[in-house]
Every structure is written in structure tokens, then in C-alpha cells.
Image (cartoon, grey):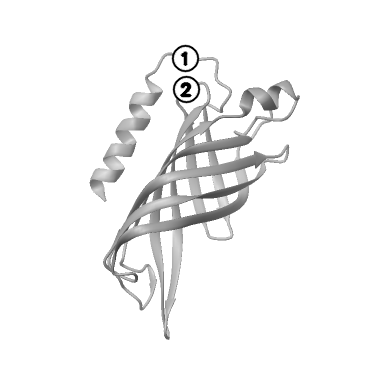
Amino acid sequence: MKSIVVSIFIIVVVGSLNAQINRNVEDHQIQLGFPIPAILYEKGIGKNTTLSVEALAGFQIRNSEYGVYPIVRGQYRYYYNLKRRLDKKKNISGNSGNYVGGLMLYQDGNSLLGNLNTTSTLAVGPVYGLQRTYRSGFFYRLETGLAYFEDDGFIKGNGIALILAARIGWVLGYKRK
């Protein structure tokens, strides 16, 4: 877990040291997500690329036991359709666009709440997603992909899994460009 967090931190710092570029993506933004509580920090590192780190809570039920677990997601995103959206006079602020990227996810097996403890899960893989941010700061994000995972807890094994994710929420301090 520590090496994952340190690696993500180093990538963000190195990315922020790059020369200033006329970016289509936000320099940085913080999002609060729902329905599962989450906080995400997204940093622009190139003209159409960002790195993000997200902390959220995961939930599992097995028989009569349950657990709420901490999850950390790190993601590289390349927003590939921003020029086309600009040409069509569509909004790109708040990183409104479609993206492809890589995902790294770590879920701790020790529950924060509940009586169900498992072991940790690590997953990495490519994703495709779309994100839209509105004038009010409200956003939604949909994401899908495949991930290789290692899990000694609930699934008890390694393999390939489908990723499906949806998030709604608000961008903190959002000001439309």
C-alpha cells in the first residue's frame, strides 16, 4: 500500500514540474462523489492528460456479516475528444470529455465498520470513461474496463475482472471557464 501511494505521489510531483502548457484540462480540481462517499483530486499534467487519486469507501455483505472498507484509486487519463468538443462549441471545463486511461486500485481488507474482515485486493488495467461537469459544479462520470486483480479474500484468487463504475457529485470551488 505504501509503495502504491509513494509511486502515485512521485508521478504527480514530476508531472507538476513539467513546463506550463496551454492545457485543455483543468490544472487541478477536487470532486466530492456520491452515492458511495468519495473524494478525488485530479491534476492536469499535459495538454489533454491528468492524474487522479481517489479515496472512497467500499461495501461488502456476506451471509449476515458486512464491512465498509477503505479504497484508493489512482488513474492516468487521456481526454481524446476535447478538440472536437471545442470545435462544436461544447463545454470542456471541469474536464468534460471522454477518456482512456489506466487504473490502479487498492482495497484494504480490514473493515472500518462492520464485522467482516478479508484480505486486501489490488487491481490494475485499462479503462474507458466519460465525464461531464455542469455550470453548477455538478458532475457525473461513467467508466468501464478490464483489470487484472489479486485477491486472497472474497474471490480468493487472481484473474481478469470487468470494471463498471458510476459516480455523481460536485466539483469543489468550481468556476466555469
Residue 167, position as x, y percentages in the image: 58, 52
Residue toward you, 65 or 149: 149
Direction from residue 90 to residue 55 in the image, left or right: left
Q: In which quarter of the image is residue 52?
A: top left
The structure residue drawn at horizontal position 45% and vertical position 60%, both measured from the top left corner, is 57
Which residue appears farthest toward the left when viewing the image?
3
Q: Which of marks 1 and 2 is in front?
A: 2
- Quarter of the image with the C terminus in it: top right
**The disc labelled 2 sits on which kind of residue?**
Gly
**The disc labelled 1 sits on which kind of residue?**
Gln
Direction from residue 163 to residue 107 in the image, left or right: left
Instruction: Give me the disc on residue 82.
Output: none
Q: Which residue does the numbered mark 2 point to in the structure image?
A: 46
Direction from residue 116 to residue 129 in the image, left or right: right
Residue 140, position as x, y percentages in the image: 64, 47
Residue 177 visible in this rendered orientation of the protein? no
- Number of labelled discs? 2
Q: Earlier in the sequence, mark 1 or mark 2?
A: 1
* Local secondary structure at mark 1: loop
Examine the rendered structure and indicate whether residue 93 appears above or below residue 1: above
Residue 86 visible in this rendered orientation of the protein? yes
Residue 21, position as x, y percentages in the image: 50, 15
The structure residue drawn at horizontal position 62% and vertical position 35%, both measured from the top left corner, is 97
Q: Which residue does the numbered mark 1 point to in the structure image?
A: 20
Q: Disc 1, disc 2: CB below 8 Å?
A: no
Which residue appears farthest toward the right when viewing the image?
89
* Local secondary structure at mark 2: loop
Residue density around tag 2, few if under 14, some if 14–19, many if 20 or more, within 10 Å: many
Which residue appears farthest toward the front when viewing the image?
160
Which residue appears farthest toward the bottom when viewing the image?
64
The structure residue drawn at horizontal position 29% and vertical position 69%, both measured from the top left corner, is 156
